[in-house]
Image: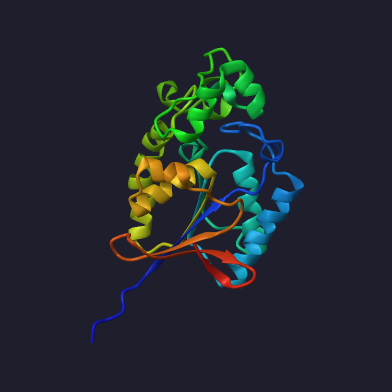
Amino acid sequence: MNKPQELTRLVLLRHGQSVWNQKRRFTGWGDVALSLQGEAEARRAGRLLKQADFTFDACFCSELRRANDTLASVQLEMGLPQLPTYRTWRLNERHYGALEGMRPWAAVCRFGIWPVLKTQIGFDTVPPLLTLDDPRAPVNQPRYRAVDRAQLPLAESMQQALERVKPFWEETVVPEIMQGKRLLIVSHQGLLKLLVMQLEGLTGAQVMRLSIATARPLCYELDNALKPVKRYYLSEQNGAQDL
């Protein structure tokens, strides 16, 4: 009789609602806090994971506050505050360039409807660029001082964000999963869509149609070849809710 294949769990978690999500602003690398709703969502995510008997060997997170605060709440609710945690700018959200901090209508008034709309539907469309002297530019922020300036964006298409995160995925995350480690990745909608793309072999057009809910654990069970055997959202009603 063949031995059942061992599966490895990977959980992707988008941060809770941020204050700019609440105000419908383009956020990207803007380092904003969770809203009160987002804080509650983060705690709920931790409770769901604990109730479903999840545990982790390590956590990965972006550099941005809303993701870090979400992860801290999850770890606290799970009773796992000392888990090894690795933070990297490569898991930051896609950079929205000069759109960051703006509401959609204000962005349309300044840049035109098509340049703004294409950033939402085009996988390889770059938003309007920041200037190098703009304080929103990562090259002007102390937390990215150790990163090669040539790698820091002034705006990113989803394709460029993929090129930024793919080496981290292939060289850091995948080897950990292949060792059977149970990982939690807390990041942002755009970046998590790109990780789903890697896991499921999606096209750029399919990625742009994806939506990932705030602070709902998206769970994958992966075989030894890193192929998804099952994926589902955790829910309070059913425990596991198929997508």
Task: Answer with the quarter of the image where residue 78 lies.
Answer: bottom right
Q: Residue at image x 31%, y 79%? A: 4
| Residue 152 in the figure: left or right of residue 45 | left
| Relative to 104, residue 45 above or below | below
Question: Residue 11 at x, y = what percent?
Answer: 49, 59
- In this rendering, the count of numbered labels is 0
Q: Residue at image x 27%, y 81%? A: 3
Give the residue furthest to the left.
Answer: 1
Q: Residue at image x 42%, y 51%? A: 196
Question: Residue 117 at x, y = what percent?
Answer: 52, 29
Q: Foreground residue, 176 or 23?
A: 23
| Residue 16 in the figure: left or right of residue 53 | right
Q: Residue at image x 63%, y 40%? A: 65
Task: Answer with the quarter of the image where residue 230 lies.
Answer: bottom left
Give the residue furthest to the bottom.
Answer: 1
The quadrant of the image that shows the N terminus is bottom left
| Relative to 131, residue 16 above or below | below
| Relative to 29, residue 175 above or below | below
Q: Foreground residue, 74 or 81?
A: 74
| Residue 37 in the figure: left or right of residue 79 | right
Give the residue furthest to the right.
Answer: 36
| Residue 27 in the figure: left or right of residue 88 | right
Is residue 101 visible to the viewer in this orientation of the structure?
A: no
Question: Residue 147 at x, y = what percent?
Answer: 45, 28
Question: Residue 174 at x, y = what percent?
Answer: 35, 53
| Relative to 225, residue 212 above or below | above
Is residue 130 visible to the viewer in this orientation of the structure?
A: yes
Q: Foreground residue, 100 or 29?
A: 100
